[in-house]
Amino acid sequence: MSIFSGGKLVLHIDDILFCRLKYMLQRDTTQGNIREYLHECQQQLATECLFMATAPSSRMNPGHISTQRQDLLKWNGWGYNDSKFVVCKDKDYYVTFSGNRYKIGNNMVLPHFGPWVKDTLGVDFDDCTPALQQPLQVPQPIINKEFMSEFEQLGISYSTDNEDRLFRAHGHTLAEIFTLRQGMFPRVPDLVAWPSCHGDVEKLILLATKHNVVIIPIGGGTSVSGALLCPENEERMIVSLDTTQMHKILWIDANNMTACIESGIIGQDLERRLRAQGYTTGHEPDSYEFSSLGGWVATRASGMKKNIYGNIEDIVVLVKCVTPRGTVERHTAGPRISAGPDIQQFILGSEGTIGVITDVTLKVRPVPPVQRYGSIVFPDFSSGVNCMREVAFHRCQPASIRLMDNEQFKFGHALKEPSRLMGLVTDGIKKIYLTRIKGFDVNTMCVATLLFEGQEEQVSSQEKKIYSIAASHGGISAGEANGLRGYMLTFVIAYIRDLGFDYGIVSESFETSVPWDKVQVLCHNVKHCVRTKCLEYNIKHIFVTCRVTQTYDAGACVYFYFAFNYRGLSDPVHVYEEIEGHARDEIIGCGGSISHHHGIGKVRRRWMEKTFTKPGLGALTAIKNYFDPTNVFANGNLF
Amino acid sequence: MESTIDTENISVNYNHQESKNSFIESEYVDLVAERREYSDLRFALQEWEPLKSYKYGTPLERTEIFNTVLHSERVNYIITQLVLKGKPRDEVEAEVSNILDQMGHTQDIAIIRRFAFMLPKIMKSIYGKVLVNRDGIEKVRNVLEETPLVLLPTHRSYADFLLVSYMSYHLRLPMPVIAAGMDFMSMSIIGDMLRGSGAFYIRRSFVDNSLYWAVFQEYVQTLIKDVGSPLEFFLEGTRSRSGKSLPPKVGLLGCVSELWLRGRVPDLALVPISISYERTLEERLYAYELLGVPKPPESTSGLLKAMSILKESFGDIIINIGTPVSLRSYLSPHADRHLYMAQPRHLLPLTRKELYACEGLGLHVLRQIQCGAVCSVWSLICVGLIQELQRGCTTVPLHQLVQEVDWLATLICKMGGTCTLKGPVDEEVKQALSVHCQVAALGSDGTVHIQQVHLDSYLPTQCKSMALEPSTVSSAVSHMMLQHYVNQAMHHFIRPALVAQAILALRDPAPSLDKIESRFRTLCSIFNYDFIFEKSNEKKDLSEGIAILVSSGEVRHDGNHVNLIDSKSPLLNLLQALLRPFLLAYRATLHTLVAGEYKNNNELVSASQRKVEEMLTNEIQASSFKVYSALTLDSLRHAARAFTKLGIVDRHKGEDGSLFLQCSAEKADMLNQILTDTQFRPLLQAHL
């Protein structure tokens, strides 16, 4: 199979096989023969590799996102057009996942998923609310004629097509997708422009400033903060500045291990192209199949493997940003500078309020030779958190370590593919081992997933350390496959929301960062808060779960999923927003932050002053006003 | 300025409530009915597990709890501080162990079973029914799995200690741990038995002992957040001898609230529990105690002596479990938790603002408790009898009393209260009189005779510390016995009574609403300790008070003014009569303050009590009402406290450097006007 020709991947698979074997031997499975087991492993791996092969980083069909995104991506939901959960009816309803991009795809029946949604969320598969097939009438564009006549001279490609404009009028919050499925935004961009380089952007901003036209920059469009929504009352012409045609890697500097890249490049494309030359940025936010480099910088994104590579602010060396006052950049690539507050820190996280990020110089690293997954089950959430805390204390985090709570652990099981006979047996044995012999309670146990990267000796010593810390907290290694599945689910989970919509379920995620001593209590309190608020709204079926996704010296990042059955409610989006508002109040009241990596956008603005004080916020506003005195960048984020 | 008081809506509301508030016995479970039919032994030995309990709690042994406390950041921090000051570490740690040993409870099912065996026997002999409202039980069951419970019962009697636990055992609710005062611990056998059934002991005063305070806080908080046991304590801090609610103590409530304020629990469910005794076990003791006749210290032998009461009948008990108050919902608008979240929790005592909010919460829960209390027929009888007694009559024709009770019951329902009245009024009155025959007995002539309760043998042999003349005590005891039950209904009347006082004392036939409001607010702040007012509810209290007067035809509400129609009407008369003892006590305190200098509050209170005595026996006042219940130390202490808080009391340094309490005549005069008895103004002025 040609997809394995990279060599590294083959190596990788051997590692997995080896590991499996080792794991099996460790468990001293005396019954059954090893040959049979090996065969089983190989078969299983074949399916896993399909995911690897089609997983974004190694997709066969290279190429960036075209100007016609809707050809590849859903116009009113998450991800690829061909990938989605499908409800089928045979004797009973069952659920499959379409497309061959993900491991659980290929229309494989997911036998546990249907019953799980029914039990947890009270879904009735006979009661379907399909989305609109076509968008409703898109609002007429407001055209600034003087601007248009000069703009057309610039030779920048553009469109006023309704679909193009609508596609760039939103991000992916619950409210936005709900609007797309059932209605229309009151205001959408009037024109979409595709500059192809930094120079194009400079000309465009100059012109927009001159004619008082609003610019809203957009990259991958995966925002979950309402950042891309056009302010409803904006009467000026709004240009959506789509950066995705600026997708070149301008240079790679092997001496300094840096690369200069245009901001519109999409995560998976960047990674694939760098890997082709033996490099990686190591930045993998969960959205990286679709999100762009510029978006990462503008929202202070965080990647799954930040423990090795750092978050975006650690990876960025230089940023070039076009503002109405001109281009801001730093004329030195010196690794650290003592010269007053760092202006780049104002651009990081500016969410499109002061300018457009065009070129970014990033640190790159050689592709690690070894990558291994792992997982640990804990008797309860509390021992899991304590283990993570200790790992962070010793600063021995692997590339990624995540802890899922019991609800999410069960949810992961619901998405399991059908087991073959041998699988059934081993699953059965595992379960008996955990619950009967180790005394784990199925209703409290939870799982941590691990990803190790680096040289073989680094990885194995790290594994040893982590598993021994875990053991001291009652954790038991649960194998590589479970770890791999965990990370795969991260990508797939985003597709579930669209299925839910059809059957009266709304769902969304929100996140925070919190000091270690408050992690457990915050998780508990927020879930309690969500549950009580749901009761107040008379919502009967809810699913609220959290996971600790990042660890730091002084705290952790916690990520919540929340879904509920809205049958019987007239305005589910409003109810959702109210409840999330209460949850955020609770988060902040328990010592959590306003956001770890999603950003502020419009949905979290109201907590800014509470968190940063009036003078703090005033200073930020003053900087925005200096860069952009006529409010060209009027997306209304942050303040 | 346009006034926003909306009286019409409120009167409509009242009519609504009338039907809702009738007492329906089928809505209650009788805790002793079953015991009368089945074996107590089997009840005590049944396999016992709560039906539901807090999901996130872990049962911990006594020593495990001690260890958690000892290793908590807060206690550790204090220990380190003390060590840094030069105390040896093992000494300090030993002290922590001592404190914990003295404090800590055990919850031994064997001891609980012993209580479960004994208590029904006692209850069956002295009580009729012990009723608990079914909907309250359900509400508690609905919250207790997700939210830790804090049970907040009224405290009128020692019986309260056992009643809630007994109820929990019967209803298979999780057994509470109970905060008890140290004085119980010294009672032999009983002290240990209480400990074994879940009581833990706290010192009465330990503000200055930082180690004790830290250990105490951690102990209480561990019980709630780690063990998840329901915590039971008395908001009022001590048994209310007067029958009214005492102002809330903020200590334990603050300690509990801190759990939420510092983000350690998602919420707490505060459960208001109103325990209404038809007859209070300690009624006679209280009467003497409030007059200042010294009481014997708590002891088991004292308790055994009290056993003689086992032969008497004490009527029914009604336990009303209110809707649990969400601590989070109440405190959220008053707290900025996020401001303190960037610092270590154990270094942050509650801020002044937070303590104030906790106090508000305490008042709120107390109001809920009051609203849940069921008013007994005897309370209403006492309202009628005490007015007669104050006029000097000791007999009342039964039919007149029945009429009065009927009228009062209707009035209370109209104001949103519930009375136990369910059958024909005369039957109920007779029934109540039979329970309380020692205080008021129905003669064969169809008249009710108020009894002379006091016997000289009750007085202790050496009564040096008693301020009052024996003759005064002799007359006052009956008053006090009646007042105890009048007070149990006072929370219904106090708001309209203060509104009436505000209107009448203005001596203006049509005072403006603004004037009334400002008077009303002043009165509320004066009587702040004697009665429970929620600051945020004062406007509502005022409009409800006016609405009651309007709906009974006493006043007319006319735009911005209130017109007095009939100052001799029965309702106004009643309200004035009910307020009279309190007005007198407060005025006496003012007089006392003007007349002399006092070293401390105790001295002031004793002097005030003598002043009341003097006013009651004074020739000039001979024709006026004999409001002996104004002698109550309870109100006199509250008066001293309120006047201090309001800044009426000046503190002087005497020549020898000691402190003196005094009050200027102008300040006193202003208050005197507000507190004037509206039926006897000329007389009093002459007296001043």
Image (cartoon, coloured by chain):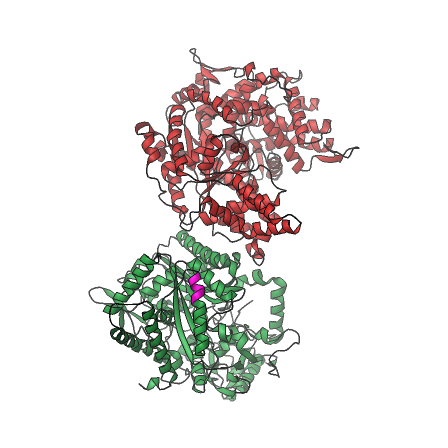
Is A567 situated above or below A51?
A: above
Considering the image in quadrants, where does the N terminus of chain A appear?
Answer: bottom left
Which secondary structure is most common in the magenta stretch?
A: helix
Residue for point 64% across, 47% down: B87
Q: A557 above or below A238?
A: above
Is the residue B227 above or below the residue B380 in the image? below
Give me the chain that's red.
B
In this orientation, which residue lies closer to the viewer: B454 or A23? A23
Answer yes or no: is residue B560 visible: yes
Residue A442's image quarter? bottom left
Q: What residue appears at the point 62 percent right and 42 percent down from the top-left corner?
A: B209
Q: Which residues are magenta?
A: A467-474
Q: Is residue B515 left or right of residue B594?
A: left
Task: Classify residue A163 by image quadrant.
Answer: bottom left
Which residue lies most toward the right here?
B655
Which chain's colour is green? A
Q: Position of residue B131 (x, y in %)?
A: 39, 32
Looking at the image, residue A386 sits to the left or right of residue A93; the answer is right
Q: x%, y% of residue A89?
A: 23, 67
Image quarter of the C terminus of chain A: bottom right
